[in-house]
Image (tube, grey):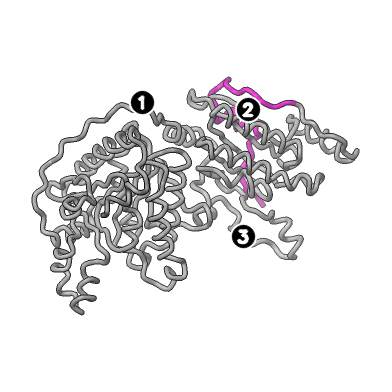
Amino acid sequence: MTDPSPARLSAAELIDLVLDGGSWRSWDTAPVRGAVDPAYAAELDAAQERSGADESVLTGEGLMRGRRVAVLMGEFAFLAGSIGRAAADRLVSSIERATREGLPLLAGPVSGGTRMQEGTPAFVQMVRISEAVAAHRKAGLPYLVYLRHPTTGGVMASWGSLGHVTVAEPGALVGFLGPRVYEALYGKPFPEGVQTAENLFAHGIIDGVVAPADVPDLLGRALDILMAPREGIAAVPAPPEEPVPEVDTWDAVIRSRRRDRPGVRRLLRYAASDAIPLNGTGQGEQDPGLLIALVRFGDVPCVFLGQDRRGQTYDRPMGPEALREARRGMHLAEELGLPLVTVIDTQGAALSADAENGGLAGEIARCLADLVTLRAPTLCLMLGEGSGGGALALLPADRVVAAQHAWLSPLPPEGASAIVHRDLSHAADMARSQHVGALDLRAIGTVDRIVAELPDAADEPEEFCARVGAVLQHELAGLIERGPSTPAERAARYV
């Protein structure tokens, strides 16, 4: 029977693949092991001879597309990539050095976990390694992880699971408890297909499944966004504001629901200079109703959170998982010092037992609290429908831009009609009387700028998206220059 697992690159081979040729410089010194028993010493000697490495991790620096980066790379041929005290010392020392020198950190774990020959003293090194990574992230420096085959145990449960962006090798065994250990403890095989890179992606735990040859391009593009300058960005001239005629509110609502109206995916296709999709909460949840990505509009970077009209269906409306995914993006923006763009385009959050059991109301509240207090510049784009608390959850921002036919309402107008008139026939009147349209919201200061539709975004999708992109680029450049508003200033927009 053929082994379905991927061919395993050595640490040195992956370093050569990812970094610019000839740029690698090791930071490693000879490991200090202290007294070890003869049997373990013999294993260490054999591992070194077999692997050509003196420990299970190699650390150092190099250039990726000309940018200086720090690297942590596992070597499976050295005692299955296991982490003992010497390996942990090497990891912690290198992470701390990367933090001091302000370098982004690239990690390529491959490991069976904690080194059993050293027992609990090795096991508790997970604490030191996790603290060092947390300090690196707190310094606002990117930490990017490529999980290789296999990555399990204490490595997966520490430096393998703390990335701002985490992708994995196709077909890789990735999980916590190694299948051999599970079978020994429980007397039956671990269920097939669970501890795979593809399954983790499907469950929103990792951001992608990427072949080794594609890693340099993905990580390089990610760093172009994450390491883009936050100061000295050239001012982007304001695009001309087209006159926006008076729009009947109900007509705007009808237009916003056109199936061919451009959503966030077409916006990114036509307006962004680069976009790297992320995936899920990182904690086992993802919702197709929300798109999270690292994006550049022109030269201006951002974290992008867009309600995806294509991913929301009658059978699966946007649920609390989408808002938890959005909160991941909010925390990324704050930690990395990037502006945050939120996009409202939803028929409304799920009204179901599952949504209630999933804490929908609490997630709306936490999104509102996170956005109002976020220590990063924020920009909201009202792109289409804006129904209910699921829409409001992404509204609070330093600046709000709206498409001409966008709207925001406590309920769909039909729902408001059902409450007030006990029928659906007054929906148009309710939409008009509740001041839900973009023009009404600009009049009361909720919206700062309206992007015209000529005459309808669905009839000119590419041109409309390009106009929106130009406005976003201008607004984001200004926000980076000014910095984030205070929570009180953000709340004052609604007085």
Q: Position of residue 120 (x, y in %)?
A: 78, 49
Q: For the residue marked with disc 2, what is the amino acid? A: Gly
Image side of residue 358 versus residue 145, left or right: left
Going by the picture, which residue comes out furthest to the top? 22
Q: Position of residue 131 (x, y in %)?
A: 63, 42
| Residue drawn 51% across the image and 57% down it | 203
| Residue drawn 27% across the image and 54% down it | 494
Q: Secondary structure at mark 1?
A: loop
**Do tag 3 and tag 1 residues touch (Cβ < 8 Å)?**
no
Q: For the residue marked with disc 1, what is the amino acid? A: Gly
Instruction: Give the number of the mark in front: 3 or 1.
Output: 1
Q: Residues within 10 Å of mark 1 (few under 14, many from 20)?
A: few
Observer-nearest residue: 391 or 211? 391
Residue 229 part of the magenta-drawn span: no
> CA separation, marks 3 and 1?
52 Å
On the image, numbered disc 1 is attached to which residue? 232
Mark 3 and mark 2 lie on one chain; the one further toward the N terminus is 2
On the image, numbered disc 3 is attached to which residue? 192
Observer-nearest residue: 434 or 85? 434
- Kindly tell me whether residue 201 is visible in this rendering: no
Q: For the residue marked with disc 3, what is the amino acid? A: Glu
**Do tag 3 and tag 2 residues touch (Cβ < 8 Å)?**
no
Q: Position of residue 208 (x, y in %)?
A: 49, 46
| Residue drawn 59% across the image and 58% down it | 194
Which of the labelled discs sits on residue 60, or is there none?
2
User: Where is 367 relative to 209, above or below?
Assistant: below
Image side of residue 48 versus residue 274, left or right: right
Instruction: Give the number of the mark in front: 2 or 1.
Output: 1
Q: Position of residue 299 (x, y in %)?
A: 34, 31
Q: Which residues are magenta?
A: 1-29
